[in-house]
Structures are given as structure tokens and as C-alpha cells.
Amino acid sequence: MWCCYRGEGFHGYQQQGELRTAQRELLQAFSKAGLTRKPVVAGRTDKGVSARMQVLSARVDNDRTAQSLVPTLNALLPSDLRLHLARDVPDGFHAAWSSISKEYRYTLTDPGDVALLHEAAALIPGTRNFKVFHFKTSQNKPRTVTSVEWLPDTSELRFKGEGFARYMVRMLVGGLMAVSHRELSLDVFRAGLEQQQNFYCATAPAEPLTLWEVGYPEAIDPFSLEDRRAFQWPDATLRPATTTLVAGQVSEAPASSVSSTVP
């Protein structure tokens, strides 16, 4: 199942007691629809982060068709969380474990020096330990980022990779903005990437970030290339809002998500 949501009204995806989360709303809708199996999610999003394409997998009774789930669940879901498509999947498909790639996009209103932005972004792709750029509870291990691109037509930074640690995209954005606004040298940013040398790295706000797409091997991908290209936000109010990011601005992320300052 492909769902989308606007993150501003949610305390993230994962259920957290009585707080309003995407998972809580989905579980309530599933229960009201008589669906007893909990859906598995491709990846959790943090408070304020939107999803253009969040993927869920779940087992349903044989008397229900995948196509019938969309109108049934949308009638029970709030306006800022919608089911877009539902498809049958082969045995063994798992929304998270079967995933081979994710794409995130971050909207900027002031990219700073675009030449510096391009130069810094070009340093990011590769397989390495990005521990300077993610929350400390995430596992320290090599991760692969395949591309980081500035899309001037939409004022977005596009990140593609096999997977991202918690706050990783937002901390990379914070570093890129510090470089492009000349608050951080390119050499310090490079040392953080290549040598894992700690430096102060602001965590960019969550609201301009969107989980854009989740990728699967072609043989088991429930969604075609045409499906992915044809997507349109179901309602104008569901499309994530643009939030101004000021250089050096730090979000509400815990202080431990920011790396130490080098003496």
C-alpha cells in the first residue's frame, strides 16, 4: 500500500501513546475496517516530516481485494493522511526489508551560494560512516548515498541512497546550508564526511523534509514507473508547506543529535 501524509500535524510516524501519529491513525482505520493485521512500514518519519510515498505491507483476508482497500480506508482516515494505491505483492515482500533505496527531498527558500552548495553536495555521495551527521542512537555503520542534487526549478535538495540514519538528511542539510552561507568551511565539512571529524552541525527543521519515494527490486516492486511518475497530491492542502530555513537555524531535535565542537 502506498500512502501519503502531511507531517506538520503528526508527532512522526511511530505510535507514541495518545499522541497523534500516522501509525496511530492507520491502526484506528484498520481496526474500524475489520483488518486485524498491523501494517509494516517502509521507514519511520520524525515529527513534522511529510511523506509523498510511504509504503505499507499487510496481510488481509482473502475476501478483500487490494483495490477495495483504498476507498474503504480513506473513508476512515483524516484528510492529511491518505491511501493512494494498494496492490497485491508476492510472498515474502516486506515494506522495509525488501526496500533497496529511498529518496528524500528538502525544500529551501534561501540556498545561499549555489556554487558552494553544489561543491559541498558533490562530496556526500559514497559509502561511508556518516556518524557526524546522524543521531547518536542510530547504528554506526557504513551507509551508501548515491546522489545529492540541487533542483533549482523546485528549490529542493534531492537525496538518494540505500538508507538513511535518524536525522541524517536534516543534519546534512544543516551542514550544506552552513557551507553555502559561508558559516562553515568546505574543508571542515569534508573532514566530517571523510574522516568523521566532529564539528558543530545544526539539524535543519523537519517541516521542509519529505520522504519522496521508496524503491524495490523490479521483480517484486508493486508500483510501476508509470505509477510513480503519475502521482499527484490528492488535495492541495495535503501538499507539504514550504518553510523558510535560515542559515544556522537549529530545529527542536535533541542536543545529542548535534556533534561535538572540535576544540
Image (tube, rainbow, N blue to C red):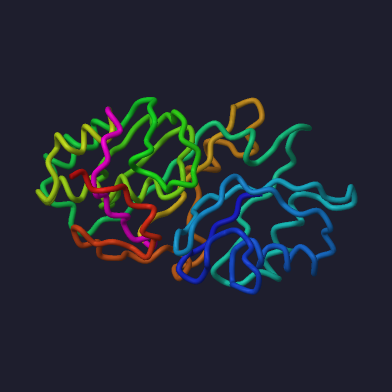
Q: Is residue 157 magenta?
A: no
Magenta residues (range) = 195-207
Query: Does residue 35 appear to the left or right of 55 in the view shown?
Result: right
The residue under the point 40% across, 36% down is 160
Which residue of the protein is positioned furthest toward the front in this rendering? 263
Q: Is residue 200 magenta?
A: yes
Q: Is the stretch drawn in magenta largely helix, strand or loop? A: loop
Residue at position x 16%, y 45% in the image: 179
Q: Position of residue 221 (x, y in %)?
A: 62, 33
How many numbered marks are there?
0
Q: Nearer the viewer, residue 179 or 28?
A: 179
Residue 113: x, y in percent?
10, 47
Quadrant housing residue 118: top left
Q: Work out whether 203 lies above or below 252.
A: above
**Quarter of the image with the C terminus in it:** top left
Give residue 23's position: percent from left, percent from top: 64, 61
Q: Relative to residue 252, is residue 54 depicted above or below?
A: above
Q: Is residue 138 left or right of residue 13?
A: left
Residue 257 lies left or right of residue 228; in this view the side is: left
Q: Please identify the quarter of the rendering in which residue 18 is found.
A: bottom right
Seen at 26% across and 44% down, the residue is 151
Residue at (44% x, 41% y) in the render: 103
Q: Position of residue 41 (x, y in %)?
A: 64, 48
